[in-house]
Image: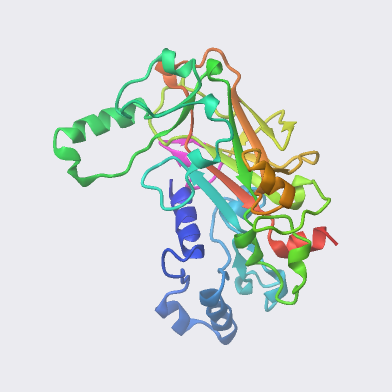
Amino acid sequence: MHFLGALELIAASALGIIEPLVIASKEENEEATEDEASIRTSSSRGRGLPPPSTTNITTLNSKVSSVLYGVSKQSTTTNANDHNHEEWEINPISCGTTFEPILNGNLQSLVVSSTTVVQETEDIMFPKGSMFYNRGWVIDLGGAERKAKQKLLRYGGLGYIDSKKSFNGVYASGVLHFFLPYDYERAHEHAPNNSNNFEQHVVGDTGHQMHSSKDAQDYFRSVIVCETNQNRSFKACNLEQDVSYTIGGVSLSEVHYIQAEGVSYLGNNICVYIDIPKLAEITTDSRSNADDNKNNVDVSVGIDLQISVTNKRVTVKDGACSISHVVWENVPCRDLHLHLH
């Protein structure tokens, strides 16, 4: 799960929880040319990154590459034909997780309808059978994770505070409905410095005026859904084949696992990539107070994501479908500024 761990570090740095990330080492800066040093100096101040290093050329050239590796800032490239002098950046990325401890981005807070999720009234270590899963999606541990924790309990836990709990569901569990908000604050960090009147055109939080555009592609590039990284049987749920996804009101005919470094566990892929379809639309958070909607104050604007298990053969015993991370890529405000004009 190195990919998800890197995203958490980036998020913590952007939120000011940890010190800003510095990419280049002291030795690299000493050996750098004048142009390279200039790029890396700007990197330490902002979001500049060196070009990605990967042997997976297929992934680098795919749509998912902007989440995994970032995008090239062609406007600041010293030589557009020289890949080694390019400056890269990560688009504004948001993440929700169920893994504990959670620094920021609790996936449970993004659930729209609590009726589709079985509340955590029981001890997380308590085994949950079909009776629970028939009532809705269950916050639960995988079999291997529960056994590992039971062994640790004999020794007082040995100081481990992490927990790989996740949303787990089968066909009878129904629809798991998330609302993914457009992260205006983080996306605004990418806005051009000369766009002083930008706020009146953007859709987002903090009371900005609503724009007539409902096209979700103007605000979101992609969504990634990940399952728990654990040892699972070959009969366990497959997020690519056994689950249906509806994003922005559009039902997707197919999704695919991401084939890349850091997005697999024990040789099995664990994250699927969802490209925002053309007809997908943004919406407001249905949980917002009616008066807030009327006055357009503190109303979250984002996109709906609905997940349901379609394969009736998926069972709790063999391995229910699990959702532990949802990552969504916001359109930077500099690009949104172009879309809305």
* Color theme of the render: rainbow
| Residue 92 belongs to the span the image colors magenta | no
Above or below residue 237? Residue 331 is below
Give the left or right position of residue 224, taking residue 331 as reference: left
Residue placed at 75% from the left, 73% from the top? 195
Would you identify the image quadrant in which residue 157 lies?
top left
Residue 142 coordinates in the image, percent (x, y) = 37, 28
Residue found at the far right of this picture? 341
Residue placed at 15% from the left, 39% from the top? 156
Give the residues in magenta.
Answer: 258-270
Above or below residue 276? Residue 197 is below
Q: Nearer the viewer, residue 174 or 254?
A: 174
| Residue 263 belongs to the span the image colors magenta | yes
Residue 335 coordinates in the image, percent (x, y) = 75, 61
Residue placed at 46% from the left, 52% from the top? 104
Residue 80 visible (yes or no): no
Give the left or right position of residue 221, taking residue 163 as reference: right
Would you identify the image quadrant in which residue 172 lies?
top right
The quarter of the image holding the C terminus is bottom right
Above or below residue 264? Residue 199 is below
Residue 20 coordinates in the image, percent (x, y) = 46, 70
Q: Nearer the viewer, residue 227 or 126?
A: 126
